[in-house]
Image (cartoon, rainbow, N blue to C red):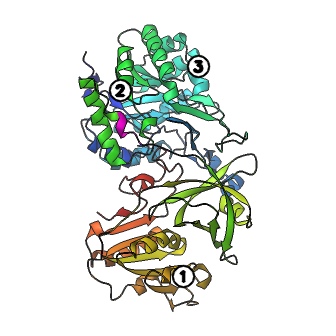
Amino acid sequence: MRVMEKRQIGNKRVMPFTIPSGIAITDPLCAARIARRVDELGIITLKSTGLKERVMPTEELYRKNPDGLEFGCREPIYVQLGDGIYANAVKLINKGAKKTREEIERANFPKDKLVVASVFAANESDLVEIIKILDPVVDAFKCNLGCPHGEKIGMAQGQDPEMVYSFARAGTHVTDKPFIVKFPANFTAECVRAAVRGGAYGGAAINTIPCEPVDEKGRHLLWNLKGGKSGRELISLGLQRTLEMRAAAGKDFFIIGEGGIFSAKNARAYFDNGADAVGLGTVLTDMDEEAIAKFFPAIVNDLENGTDYASALIPKVNMQRRPATIRKIMNKGCDFRIYEIDISIDAKPGQFVFAGLYGGERPEEKPFSVMDDNPLTIGVLERGLFTRKFGELREGDEIYVKGPCGKGVSVPPKSNVVLVGGGCGIAGLALLAKRLSADSNVLTLLAAKDNAHLAYLDEFRKYGEIRVITEDGSSGKRGLVTDLMYSLPSESYFFNCGPKGMVNSVLPLELSLSSPEKIYSSLDLVTRCGMGICGSCVDDKGRRTCKEGPFMSAE
């Protein structure tokens, strides 16, 4: 069979390319959006789903633990170990099977794609229940028996032949759709034969390999301490394991080869070693939608013509931590403080950085808007475990910085620009005001609950007219930001940054004055990896805000 022929899987014939579960297209809305743009992606593998919701742990949830919640990992969850080599630890955070089904139903996947639900379970009965919930809305199942940091699930199951057999048997008895087993890197031939005996349609390998990454001083890089390594280093192992899987399973077992694919040459080697389809995942690190939509056709072209043009499309990624010192703390009397850091970075307006803490057993970090890049200045609102720790820092204390991340924004010269900020969203507008005012007219509208939270005003005044308002009337008028939206020039560029409620309240007014392609909003969504990999920051249109944003148009 030629590499580029479509493959028959179940009742569909599709192109033999996928993105492994848990990478980039982790939200169904995002997955459907990418599926519509990339013809070469025939197999759409969704994020692994359990029976119950599994959430990122917070101090409050740990203390109360309502309904026996299951927990994943806090940040950092994705770190760079070398060129094209990464480690991750998310620990199967997901929304649960019922919520996932609802999201798949809303996503409107193209009919010519094979939608695969990746599932995990602690036992066969939970697996059966998950499959029954999802069976009406997907085309196939992949059973995740390969995750290296899922405690008693994942890899612990996939290296046990009896458990592989029992899970394959249970899954194939409850659905007539293809049931694929995702194996860990250390699977045995006996495990593969057990999957075949259990009725599995196929197998996928390899998953990430266990690691415990540390820096040059022996400090851990992942909050979970241990994680899974992915990227270029896995290519030789993945190819060998694919060859062994084919030998153990026979010719009729459908194999998806995954691990270390960064070029058409790598993909071709998987096909030559017995893979029926291939998964490209880690290589997508730091790619936005446009880049992904260009990369897969380039891989296909290279496969057909023996070229290597796709390699030039892979971003040069630098996720390394930079040690830094807090030089100055402003607005100290408030829970919204501004920190001037003793380093400079080259940031575009709208971008963000991760600021992290070395102290304690585990590293911790969160993303913050770049208020200025020379010197680096960030605003931090104290509202959770990490930001409370950050609020205890003093001038002279050490932190680390990663970034910048996200896209910058720009407008044509001599434009009219209106910046609209609410709460700590003020921080996301400062660098925009500074840069865009160089050749455009900038009007800044700022709202906060009181005077103390209207920080950085002297800087904003340097770059154009400002209007302020507070909920308690302690500065400017008493009211909301919508009360400042009068006498605005038509066809202005609008940039909104703040809570979703604020953004929703100003959008109708802005749309009456300007066109959607001139209106951009940055929502306060959870951004965890900053590289477009984990998919936690997807908005209601399926866009990953860390890559397509954080400022995204109203189109």
Asked if 261 appears above or below 293 in the picture, the reply is above
Indicate whether residue 315 is drawn in magenta: yes
Q: Name the residue under label 3.
A: 159
Q: Can residue 42 be seen in the rendering of this structure?
A: no
Label 3 or label 1, whichever lies nearer to me, is 1
Residue nearer the viewer, 94 or 23: 23
Measured in 3D between alpha carbons, the distance from the residue under mark 3 to the one under mark 1, in whole angstroms, is: 59 Å
Which amino acid, mark 1? Leu
Image spot of residue 440 (x, y percent) = 34, 77
User: What residue is disc 2 on?
Assistant: 177
Q: Nearer the viewer, residue 65 or 453?
A: 453
- Picture layout, residue 436 above or below residue 207: below
* Residue 14 in the figure: left or right of residue 377: left
Q: Which of marks 2 and 3 is in front?
A: 3
Residue at label 1? Answer: 457
Q: Write the residue at 73% across / 67% down.
A: 395
Does residue 439 show up?
yes
State left or right for residue 305 relative to residue 386: left
Residue nearest the observer in this picture, 261 or 122: 261
- The magenta span reads 311-318
Judging from the image, what secondary structure is the residue with disc 2 in? loop
Local secondary structure at mark 1: helix
Q: What residue type is labelled 3?
A: Gln
Q: Which amino acid does label 2 sit on?
A: Lys
Q: Is 40 in the magenta?
A: no
Q: Residue 254: x, y in percent?
A: 37, 18
**The N terminus, quarter of image:** top left
Q: Where is residue 331 in the image (x, y as percent from the top left)?
A: 65, 77
Residue 99 spot, x, y in % from top left = 45, 48
